Amino acid sequence: MSSSVKFASNRLLLMLLSGLLFVLICDIDRVLGASVYKSPNLDDARHWKRSAENYLKQVLSYDENRRMKPSVAKNVIIFIGDGMGVASLSTGRIYKGQRAGRSGEEEQLSFDTFPNTGMSKTYNTDRQVPDSAGTATAMFSGIKTRSGVVGADYTITETNLEAAKVSSFMEWAQAEGKRTGIVTTTRITHATPAACYAHTINRNYECGAKIPVGLKSRIKDIARQMIEDEPGRNMNVMLGGGRNCFGAPVPDHLKSEYRFQGAMEKTCLRTDGRNLVDDWRVLKNGTKAQYVWKTEDLRQVELDEVDYLLGLFADDHMSYDTVRNRGDDGEPSLSEMTEAAIRVLQRPGSPGFALMVEGGRIDHGHHQNHAHLALAEVVELDKAVETALKMVDLDETLILVTADHSHAMTFNGYPDRGNDILGFGNRPNATPYETITYANGPGFQQHRWNDTLLAEDADWATWVKVGQLNRSDITYRHLAAFPLGDETHGGEDVAVFASGPGASLVRGTFEQNYIAYVMSYAGCMGPAKRLNVACDDDFRLEFNQSSGAAGSHPMAAITIITTTTTSIALVIVRVASILRDLL
């Protein structure tokens, strides 16, 4: 064979092998059956159901290997510290101890001693750092979704709401005959509580005034959904703020004297002239129902007799606990509302209850860099958990405590043991900085020296000395490194604490939507009920029936992928060897 023919043959072979290599590389996603960089927008409701159920089966397989019997939770209570990331837990714990005259570091929150803990991944389907609407939908419905979406999967549009709806654990509980309730310190129509009962494309649609004119005929505001639709209309307890969203009047002299800044402080005023509280009264006519709007009203309710209790204690969000009116004409604490809710829900001979309690103002304090207000709210949530622990039968009540997301707050420096958690993070003879600081937020402006530093030749890093500011002022803001009107959320994992039947399911690091499946499985309600043998004596766990089949164990999929990847790698190595010989 002539050299020219040999060269042409080698060149043709090289082209063919290069093409084969290109196809293998480009088609690796199809071969593996998954995309390494899969678009999060492809994660529909079916994906998240499979994800949560697979993790649940994996955890159950551990328990079965240890001969642990499935258990049933008659009652389910989930406490949400909105924005209560790990830094908030640590600093809140110290804050609690120091307010009691101790050094603080050794203090314990009421849920620190829960037997099971885990970490949940909080991202939305379209955001690395999430918002409360998407995270609440994940926790309560078992389906992750887009930022800003309440009670629907990521496919929701302005025209397909019905198709995108997902059910919450409140609906699951009601289907089993359980009593249900929500308690919050935010507007009761705010993102987290709304995910218990509402379905909407935009969390801001709390009242009709926020819905664009062209959409009003197709979209019902969140307040109306709570009063008119299931499961909201069936809830036995609904306590929080947000009278404005319902068109419920209140005397001016009862309005809070404190007004804080930030996007979270902007309420929604009804413009349709309706008073939804009156509508609720009509719907509950003939039942033992009561509406309350101040602490005195709540304390006068025969809680063991009433069947339905609606309480709206503020026009907007309820006041921070630090500045709350503690008088009879003021607002009840979160722990007092929690006690009232449990008394209404906990009835002899009933199938049990499901309750969501939110310490929502933790989040709002952080958004404005008001660390002192946020930590006081952590302590109040701690009191609410302690209240519940004293009231329920712990052998039949699953209690979960977690956060929907974290915040851009840091707990830093090298302060001495027992140092004021709201104080300085370094030695007295150095330029002072605070133990608690924020990555961003309005605190930047409060600490900047003056406006002249905006000049081009100014030293932008020059700050007012912390000691020169009135740090005892209720509106004081901690230092933020970057100026924003509202501080942002944080994207790191958050802690989950669990006690009671089903608590053993909380372990490891898992997707946030798995929390709903823990409640479903333990509470014998919703999509995971069928997996709990204790819910039906004649039932056998599905994953046991096929334990010998390929792919039945979580590691099987990994093995298949690893094997396929190895085969492709060998092909690529072989092709490279041939190319090297030819060249």
Image (cartoon, grey):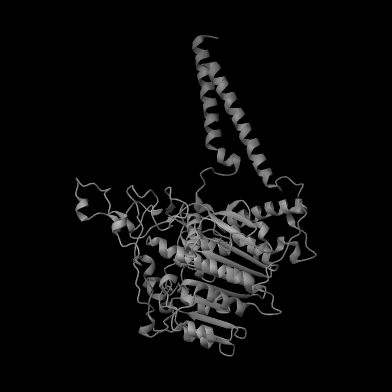
- Picture coordinates of residue 487 (x, y %)? 38, 58
**Which of the 4 image quarters holds residue 284?**
bottom right
Please tell me which residue lies in front, 570 or 233.
233
- Picture coordinates of residue 85 (x, y %)? 49, 57
Q: In the picture provided, is 114 more to the left or to the right than 212?
A: right
Q: Residue furthest right?
A: 538
Whether residue 104 can be seen here? yes
Whether residue 320 can be seen here? no
Please tell me which residue lies in front, 246 or 397.
397
**Which of the 4 image quarters holds residue 346?**
bottom right
- Picture coordinates of residue 271 (x, y %)? 37, 80
**Which of the 4 image quarters holds residue 356?**
bottom right
Locate the N terminus and report the quarter of the image it occupies: top right
- At a point 53% along the width and 42% down the height, the residue shown is 36
Please tell me which residue lies in front, 197 or 188.
188
- Picture coordinates of residue 457 (x, y %)? 19, 45
Q: Residue furthest top?
A: 2
Please tell me which residue lies in front, 581 or 445.
445
| Vertical position of residue 70 compared to residue 5: above or below | below
Looking at the image, how many numbered discs can be counted on the residues? 0
- At a point 74% along the width and 66% down the height, the residue shown is 535
| Vertical position of residue 11 compared to residue 207: above or below | above
